[in-house]
Image (cartoon, rainbow, N blue to C red):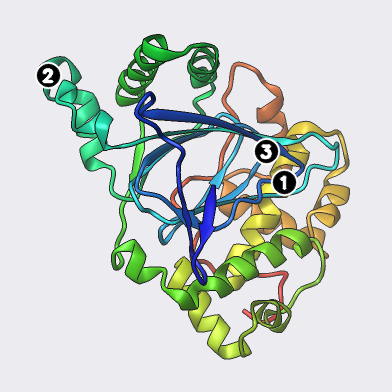
Amino acid sequence: MIQSGRKLKFEKVPLSEESSIVLTPSSGPLLECSLHYHPELEITMVLSGSGQALFGSNLTVFHPGDLALIGSSVPHLYISVPDDSGRPAETWALKFDSRVTECGLLNLPEFKEVAAMLRENRSATIFPNAPEFRQDFARLAAAAGADRMLAFLELLVRMSRKPKQVLQENVAPPRRLWSSDREPVERAVRFLQQHFREKLSLRDVAEAAGMEQESFRRFFRRTVQVSFSDYLIELRLVCAGRLLRETSRSISGIAEASGFRNLANFNRLFSRRRGVSPREYRKLCACPEVPPVRSGWTGVPQTSAGGTRGK
């Protein structure tokens, strides 16, 4: 259950005396959870869907097979791009509270790697391209009681041994950072999710957020740590990457369907931010023995943006 204060939403996780973990599936045309926080830690597994995620002030991208460990009381939000095929975006969210982390079990030497992983996790820890964890969530969904807890501990151990990226929170504590004036962020990203394929200006998004144009420009960069135009371009590139991977549409058609009005500009931005051209990206994704080139979880580049007005 997500309870709303004025702006940022507090989610009351339905833990009980009989269960210290909660596993929740989510499926729909789009991932549309509100910007929210909860004291419990969370592990989110993306089964299908691509888009952007916000963990505190860290803006990242996500793809199928990505896993995220989200820290206690860190405001977070997933925004997926529409899938023209009609396939739903699907995730598993596993939440657990301090009874797990403070019970003393993690103080045992056998769990030192798990304890270190949880201790280092301040904002979020990202495990990109980790589809092998799907089987862990399948076991968790099928188990109950002590069997579920054992499956959960095995998941933590496997995560602690997997290459990962720890996102650092370099701003004020979450509840002070995400004060009542942060609602425009959620209105803006919702508007961009619905209209990113259209020709948009800074004024369009500022109006959707309920702010004056220049105030919104400064506010968005300060809050999300990237400019409006960088955010929009990355959202369009996520969509283009999915279409390159999953369809046989022409590159010019994909560029247009993703919101780029100029093919040369699309090729330039894709190559700069993905390290390969759209055509090379498609070839790599079609080769099963070579992992596809992926945009990083570290946020979108701070480069000058093209293809949008009102940077």
Could you say which is closer to the camera, residue 156 or residue 66?
156
Give the structural element (helix, strand or loop) at label 1.
loop
The residue to which callout 2 is attached is 108
The answer to the question of whether label 3 and label 2 lie on touching residues, with beta carbons closer than 8 A, is no
* Marking on residue 164: none
Image quadrant where one finds the C terminus: bottom right
Residue 276 against residue 201 in the figure, above or below: above
- Amino acid at dot 3: Gly
Query: Quadrant of the rendered structure where residue 223 is?
Result: bottom left
- Amino acid at dot 1: Leu
Label whose residue precedes the other's in the sequence (3 or 2) = 3
- Amino acid at dot 2: Leu
- Disc 2 packing (10 Å; few <14; some 14–19; many ≥20): few
Label whose residue precedes the other's in the sequence (2 or 1) = 1
Could you tell me which residue is drawn at 51 percent across and 20 percent down?
A: 137
Q: CA distance from mark 3 to mark 1?
A: 8 Å
The residue to which callout 3 is attached is 49
The residue to which callout 1 is attached is 30
Give the structural element (helix, strand or loop) at label 2.
loop
Q: In the image, residue 109 lies at what x, y percent?
A: 11, 18
Residue 151 against residue 181 in the figure, above or below: above
**Can you see residue 305?**
no
Could you say which is closer to the camera, residue 41 or residue 252?
41
Q: CA distance from mark 3 to mark 2?
A: 38 Å
